Amino acid sequence: MAQQHLEPTDPLAGPVTGDALAGYLRSQATEFLRALRQHRESGAQAPGAEDPVDAARALRRSVRRISASLHTFRPLLDTDWSESLRPELAWLSGTLGMEHGYESRLERLLLALHRLSGAVFPAQAVSADAAAGSRGNASGGTPSTPTPDRGNLTVGAAKAGALLDRQLTLARTRAHSTALQALGSSRFHAVADSIAVLASEVPLTRTAGTTDLHPMATAAQERLEDAVTALPLVTAGHPYNAEALVHGLSPDPSPHPQDAPWHQVRLLLRLHRYAGEVLCGTNPSVEVRLLTAGQALDRHRDASEAAAAAAAAARTPRIAPATAYALGVLHADQRHEVEAARFAFQQCWQKQAVGTP
Amino acid sequence: MAQQHLEPTDPLAGPVTGDALAGYLRSQATEFLRALRQHRESGAQAPGAEDPVDAARALRRSVRRISASLHTFRPLLDTDWSESLRPELAWLSGTLGMEHGYESRLERLLLALHRLSGAVFPAQAVSADAAAGSRGNASGGTPSTPTPDRGNLTVGAAKAGALLDRQLTLARTRAHSTALQALGSSRFHAVADSIAVLASEVPLTRTAGTTDLHPMATAAQERLEDAVTALPLVTAGHPYNAEALVHGLSPDPSPHPQDAPWHQVRLLLRLHRYAGEVLCGTNPSVEVRLLTAGQALDRHRDASEAAAAAAAAARTPRIAPATAYALGVLHADQRHEVEAARFAFQQCWQKQAVGTP
């Protein structure tokens, strides 16, 4: 049970060396190859194959972990090898994530439009559909897609929804093609070959087998803590501080610069969490706290990008004023989601700081 | 010092009878007549006359208190007299309040547009102006008006600001004419005559002089507490509950029905506070708590009406999409102010409930 409370920096933790890193990388590489095989089978419509979406998610999951470990434990790995692999993993992770990004952004925005129209909350309708599907469907069809329909929306909201649907579906289709092209490219095959080698043989430095991983994990934790310290957490802890919507009508079409430090903390939190996986394996007590903080930052990122998508859609030429009005309300709604996510992170982090011995 | 903690329902408080009510009504009637004289002098540009805005505010202030006392302590007053005067006071209070309402709504919306544009916050500029004015102005001019200019606004926000300025200034001008007409009407002169009589002779019932006021004040307090109990305070106490913007895109152009119970509590809180004034005079310790709760509800009402004004402006025919977008952002911003005000009231009320012995 004492094991459950270990932190990477716990002085009671025994030495964990490069061998543990090698084990972690091998298992993640194996996971990658398994997901890749699944993805190919599902693409080929093999009987019993898993959903290609699940397979793509599993691919991204292992790529993120390999990439993070190469970064955090850099001194223990062959420099040429890791320096050449890391940008390739970043490319792959980015390319594979785009499609899912557009899909979830559209879903988030359509759900918000329904909520703002006072319509029946579509999540309920979706659950009801899914339940009906699982009870058996006479026509043998699959349960309806989780993207809510726009039947209950008012005129402005309906037009805004149709516009977002058109724009984000187009972007998603393009991202899908790009991802398929990427998976068929020689560039991808080179990455896959590297990871296939990694599954059996990790290029550690000569001294890595006896080097303690803790200082590097601690450094990752400190980078996170420094970045959190630089966040405006006092403001974020005051509900309704109206900070996230400042510049909401600024002419700058780029994403809000105030969001960047939060996005950075999100990435550093992930590096810290994966470093913990290398050292302790998956530790439920650490995981829950970090996962909750991470979920708040995921929500922050998602709402930030959804707000930007609504603002971008409002710049479409020749839209009706009612459409633009609905997009303005939607943008502000998502910026308040950004603010709410910051508040949630602040609350979670504060508890975490108090809870740590 | 013990006096500071008295509540209207405090069992230690000695009997307060209809004589105290008569004294309160006489002083408020005197206050009304003084404000009316000031208003006439300021309208006639008499030298040294006070600002007509201040005089109108003082008029409304005394009318509200007389009207509230007639309501709360109804059984102690001549029925025919009070029943005929109350609707006249409501008419007067409403008519005199319109102009100020439009003015402060426009100011609130223009300030919000500046904040949302990331422009220099005009309140700071206004303070700086006021400070410069108070330090002595070489040209002898008055400090600039607190209504912010639109110089720093972006195109959509600037157009939205100009539209709101046009619409609300027109409404304000009409309200000003209506108020002036009202103050010159025979209907108003009849009210003023009634109040002039009230300044010397309050039409109490025969038994009022020996009747304790506490039960009636307690009833007013209970009506307030019942109405507060019916509010969704649990939801309001959860920051970022996103409740105020539900129906933000609903096709119904009428004000949000969810706001009505809060507006009602605002009126009942005022009745309770004025009843306290009759019984205890102005009691600083009670006043601060009730004033803070009342200010939250004032902010709720103001933001609710400002949000409705932004939504109404967005329905103007032939506006540019950028204008409509800015009005959508502005509407959502003010609805979040509504939510923030509910949260502030909940926090204040909770403290009050805990703080009461």
Image: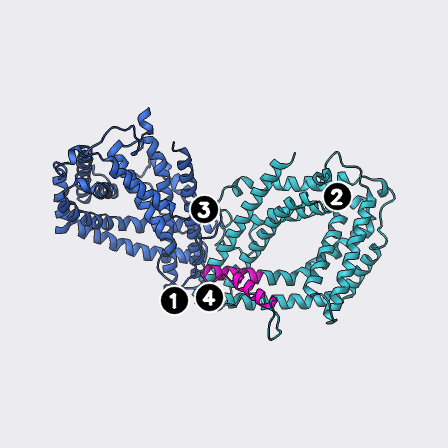
Chain colours: A cyan, B blue
Q: CA distance from mark 1 to mark 2?
A: 63 Å
Label ID, residue A301: none
Q: Residue A116's spot in the image, x, y percent?
A: 46, 59
Q: Earlier in the sequence, mark 4 or mark 2?
A: 4
Q: Amino acid at mark 4?
A: Leu
Q: Amino acid at mark 2?
A: Cys
Q: Quadrant of the N terminus of chain A?
A: top right
- Residue A176 sits in quarter: bottom right
Q: Nearer the viewer, residue A183 or A344?
A: A344
Q: Which residues are magenta?
A: A105-134
**Tag 4–tag 2 contact (CB < 8 Å):** no
Q: Are marks 3 and 1 on the same chain?
A: yes
Q: Is residue B146 visible?
A: no
Helix, strand or loop status at disc 3 = helix
Q: Quadrant of the C terminus of chain A?
A: top right
- Chain of the residue under the numbered disc 2 shown in the image: A
Q: Identify the residue under disc 1.
A: B318
Q: Are marks 3 and 4 on the same chain?
A: no
Q: Amino acid at mark 1?
A: Arg
Give neighbour class at mark 3: few <14, some 14-19, many 20+ (Cα, 10 Å). few
Q: CA distance from mark 3 to mark 4?
A: 29 Å
Q: Identify the residue under disc 4.
A: A153
Q: Is residue A44 left or right of residue B197?
A: right
Q: Identify the residue under disc 3.
A: B234
Q: Amino acid at mark 3?
A: Val
Q: Identify the residue under disc 2.
A: A280
